[in-house]
Amino acid sequence: MSTLEIRDLHVEIDGKEILRGVDLQVRSGEIHALMGPNGNGKSTLLAAIMGHPRYVVTQGQILFDDQDVLAMTVDKRSQAGLFLGMQYPQEVAGVTNSDFLKAALNSRREKPIPLFTFIKEMEKAVNELEMKSDLAHRYVNEGFSGGEKKRNEILQMMLLKPTIAMLDEIDSGLDVDALKIVANAILKQTQDHTMGLIIVSHYDRFYQLIQPTHSHIMIDGKIVMSGDSTLVTKIDEDGYDWLQKELGVEIKEIEEPIIKRTSVGSLGTCAVNPKNGQVHE
């Protein structure tokens, strides 16, 4: 069993603090729903775990099976078994899906994957997600609809088989039928209990299909309440206003940045803590 542990995590971007002390533990086989009003730090948390260079960790730890994730470059985090399904998948002109996925798989193997094995696995995943048969030869996300881009993220997850997958609003842009297809594909990946999930979504319908084992509410950069799947239902029925009375927390927009495009070269750079000069990959 693998464990991702976040301890007292503080993160800022462009000098503005977004996360203000997050504690979270995710194990293999667990499905964690991460909820909260827009702009309260959910996407920031996932981006920081994966190592986006503009998100600066100023305090706290991220441990994956007792390894210091903050000391890893982005590619090493992926090779260790972390995966992020992005809210805004990027187009990569001139690179076919098959070349992209084969390169990603080979970066995690001692020997390159045999071509026949790769083709067989990719075709199987494409069929399960009911994607177009010419997907392998199309450039990554170029000309894709919003729903196709989200399915392509799940396709990557299915082939890479991460230990901990983080899905940032992977359900947005999907119609009812596509939502069920994606949910079924995600659940199939968790059947052997070797993969843990953190899922950000605003829709109770998606969580009903996924059935999280744990639920968390994030307000103002902190997890203020945790529970089981019944917490998702309560939020769907009552919203977040009741938390102000029950916990005395103020619900406000903190203008969480949405970063849609990052140059490939910048992903290997380091984020430096301006307060103590400590370098975080």
Image (cartoon, grey):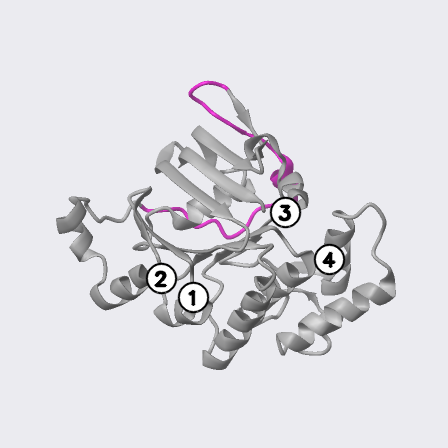
Q: CA distance from mark 4 to mark 3?
A: 18 Å
Magenta-colored segment: predominant secondary structure: loop
The residue mark sitting in front, 4 or 2, is 2
The residue singled out by tag 1 in the image is: 211
Residue 94, placed above or below residue 47: below
Q: CA distance from mark 3 to mark 1?
A: 23 Å
The residue singled out by tag 4 in the image is: 100
Q: Position of residue 17 (x, y in %)?
A: 35, 35
Helix, strand or loop at mark 1? loop
219 sits to left or right of 157: left
Helix, strand or loop at mark 3? loop
Q: Residue flagged by tag 4: what amino acid is it? A: Phe
Q: Which mark is residue 81?
A: 3
Q: Position of residue 21 (x, y in %)?
A: 35, 35
Residue 240, placed above or below residue 175: above
Disc on the earlier residue, 1 or 4: 4
Q: Position of residue 125 (x, y in %)?
A: 68, 70
Q: Position of residue 97 (x, y in %)?
A: 72, 64
User: For residue 274: magenta?
Assistant: yes
Report if the CB atoms under discs 4 and 3 are less than 8 Å apart: no
Q: CA distance from mark 1 to mark 4?
A: 31 Å
Q: Which residues are magenta?
A: 255-277
Report if the CB atoms under discs 2 and 1 are less than 8 Å apart: yes
